[in-house]
Amino acid sequence: QVQLVESGGGLVQAGGSLRLSCAVSGRTFGTYAMGWFRQAPGKEREFVAGINWSGLSTSYVDSVKGRFTISRNGAKNTVYLQMNSLKPEDTAVYYCAAARRSGMAPELSEPYDYWGQGTQVTVSS
């Protein structure tokens, strides 16, 4: 059974930074594409960033390009989301997800096989 545990959320002022971590249990971390999603109150869950199994291919939603960076550490079975220049509109619950595929991380929720419980990010103005 694969488990994903997010950490690193919190309250930060606009313009600040946070780094989210997602620890993945199991020995097959290297075969998963990983994604970060977020869901704000009253809104649908949206794709934020994705990274393929090798870490060589990444993708981002337009609203975070240049501000957020996704990365992964195979030795630690962990994927990260570095968030800089945070804005109040980034406030949401952030989820990491794992998809058993070798290609690009999907930007839709359905292809993902495993999800974390989420971590709250609140950006004050």
Image: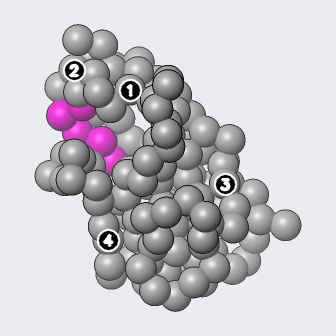
- Residue at x 69% of width, y 80% of height: 28
Give the residue type that dot 4 points to: Thr
Give the farthest residue toward the top: 125
Precedes in sequence: disc 1 or disc 2: 2
Between the C-alphas of marks 1 and 4, the distance is 22 Å
Asked if one can make out residue 8 in the rendered structure from this viewpoint, the answer is: no
Precedes in sequence: disc 1 or disc 4: 4
Q: Considering the image in quadrants, where does the C terminus appear?
A: top left
Residue at which label 1 appears: 91
Q: Is residue 82 above or below residue 52?
A: above
Mark 4 neighbour class, 10 Å CA radius: few under 14, some 14 to 19, many 20 or more: some
Nearest the viewer among 1 and 39 is 39
Precedes in sequence: disc 3 or disc 4: 4
Q: Nearer the viewer, mark 1 or mark 2?
A: 1
Magenta region: which residues? 82-86
Residue at which label 3 appears: 115
Q: Is residue 68 above or below residue 7?
A: below
Residue 89 magenta: no
From the viewer's perspective, tell me whether residue 67 is left or right of residue 119: left
Mark 2 neighbour class, 10 Å CA radius: few under 14, some 14 to 19, many 20 or more: some
Residue at which label 4 appears: 58
